[in-house]
Amino acid sequence: MTAMADFLPESIADWTRDNSSVTYDRETIFDYIDGAGEVYRSYAFSHVLVAVYAGPDGPDITVELFDMGNPADAYGVFSYAREREESGLGGGYERRGRVLCFWQNRYYVCVTAEERTENVDRILMDVARAISERMPPASNPPDLLTSLPSAGRVASSERFFHLHPSLNYHYYLARENILKLGPETDAVLARYAPGSTYLLVVEYPSASAAAAAASSFKQGYLPASSDSGTMQTENGKFSAYEQRDQHIVVVLDAESDTAAEDLRQATVDRLTQPSR
Amino acid sequence: MATGKARLSRRDFMKGVGGALVGMAVGLPATASGTITPPGVSRVVLIRNPDVVLGLRRTDGELIQRMLDEAMVSLFGLDTPSECWARIIRPDDIVGIKTNVWHYLPTPPEVERAIRRGVLGAGVLERNIGMGDRGVRRSNIFRRSTALVNSRPMRTHAWSGVGSLIKNYIMFDNPVRYHPDACASLAKVWDLPITRGKTRLNVLVMLTPQFHNLGPHHFDEEYTWPYGGLIVSTDPVAADAVGLRIIQQKRRQVFGADRPLQPTAHHIALADTEYGLGNASMDRIELVRLGWQEGSLI
């Protein structure tokens, strides 16, 4: 296996990598990024290599190369907080301010300029491209995303994760883990218009695990739901859920019962398509 | 459905179960003000100055000193700042000043110096004053401390909603212990032998607060603004509750109503409702506003 350091050129145009690269693993990540290290640990993150490039005139460039264990989790951490996604670098990238992040294969990469300069956009992209070219080829996003209907889906709102705290980060559902999420579950969440409807799809290791989670969810969140699993909540919006084999589909905050049921059904239809 | 504390759900918030949590979730505006603090009510002083911020991580030290002095006099209702410091710090105290070193937005050295001056002015020997963040568990001064002063900037945080005064004590223990449920149990760290009952003053730095995260851990000054404030109180929960409302209001102003904190900063409300550390509900907070009022967001 190629060492992550091999993805980092010694120099990129006028920028030269210094010799002070540092690696942090799942235990030492907090020494580097404080409590937010839990975001990475909520995936299969194994370690991050941090390197700095210095140029003659511009600001230092910090490169963080995260080994997320597998492509799905590299996409997951990329999706965690991205607001816009652009194509043309790795599996997708986002640039905000002085930071450019992309995911490629099992890796999540962030390139940060220590200061804003006039040409910071070009510098970030040059450095990111030079690294990307040395990395394994890009992968597709997790297959579970194909269960999300495209009609009405808000661009770049898709999140992929495993754990209950991650769900609560994106959509606060409950303090207790009523959907029984864990490292062995895959989940995708996306926002839909009109309004601000959320669609959650969870894949469990087995149908029995999904059934247990569905029972827990009904008892903990929608105890008065109809036989069809739909009910109006206190904010006047509508929620619906359904377990289908090893999956649970949950619609939250839909504008009407019909909208909730339609979105749920469209999702179930996609899950049961033979091509999946 | 279950409504016990352990099962508090989004629907409980909608229904109003959970007390202060409701206010924390929706960012209710401040209502309390006055000059005499009733029993059970926490006084919080918000002081602002439009000229104190010289840039990101650049602060006018003289104005900081004046702001802290004014805030102390107002907080304790005494005539001079030195009387106020003498009220909370004894000459024989061993004092730990807990700061925050996050390099993008640390406790400003000007604030650290103003606090140290106050403690020295109360008669504490220089050798009995310690200041630090990481490593406080191993610090001889902090381990022997009889009094603590707590100060940090407020910022959004990808795991706890905000970096708060309450959270600033996480370094007194193994931080990982407090990470579940968006750091819901952070108030417990205030009940360790090294911290219990020792905190005399909290200074929440709102000079250039950070109101939004850039990814899980990155920083961009685009998400800070020159608020020019300090929030001072003996109640860390109340000070955090006020700071949180300002952050939430700024997010509403910038993003519109549909951008709640991610995750919710419920550790502040729970510090009140589950751990009794202080008051998170604005109807039990007496907010005293001093100085610059424009754009106070609360």
Image (cartoon, rainbow, N blue to C red):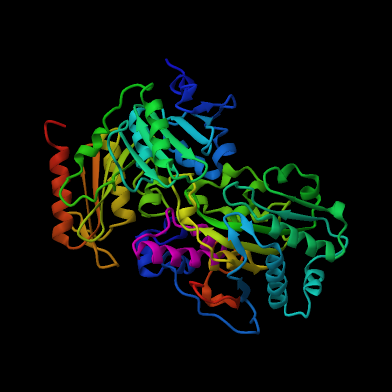
Tell me the quadrant of the picture where the N terminus of chain A can be found.
top left
Vertical relation: A77 (above or below) B162: above
Residue closest to the eye, B266 or A105: A105
**Residue A227 appears at what percent x and percent y?**
17, 55
Does the magenta-highlighted stretch encompass residue B257? yes
Q: In the rendered image, which quarter is residue A271 located in?
A: top left
The answer to whether residue B277 is visible is no
Relative horizontal placement of residue B72, taking residue A21 as reference (left or right) = right
Total numbered circles: 0
Q: In the rendered image, which quarter is residue B243 located in?
A: bottom right
Does the magenta-highlighted stretch encompass residue A178? no
**Residue A52 appears at what percent x and percent y?**
54, 31
Residue at left offset 45%, top offset 65%? B250
From the image, give the main secondary structure of the stretch colored magenta: helix
**Residue A264 appears at what percent x and percent y?**
17, 50
Residue closest to the eye, B206 or A71: B206
In the image, farthest residue toward the front: A57
Please report the bounds of the magenta region as a residue range.
Answer: B243-272
Tell me the quadrant of the picture where the C terminus of chain A can be found.
top left
Relative horizontal placement of residue A201, taking residue A16 as reference (left or right) = left
Residue closest to the eye, A37 or A119: A119
**Residue A8 appears at what percent x and percent y?**
46, 23
Residue closest to the eye, B196 or A15: A15
Vertical relation: A25 (above or below) B241: above
Vertical relation: A106 (above or below) A155: above
Relative horizontal placement of residue B96, taking residue A267 as reference (left or right) = right
Residue at left offset 86%, top offset 51%? B127
The answer to whether residue B171 is visible is yes
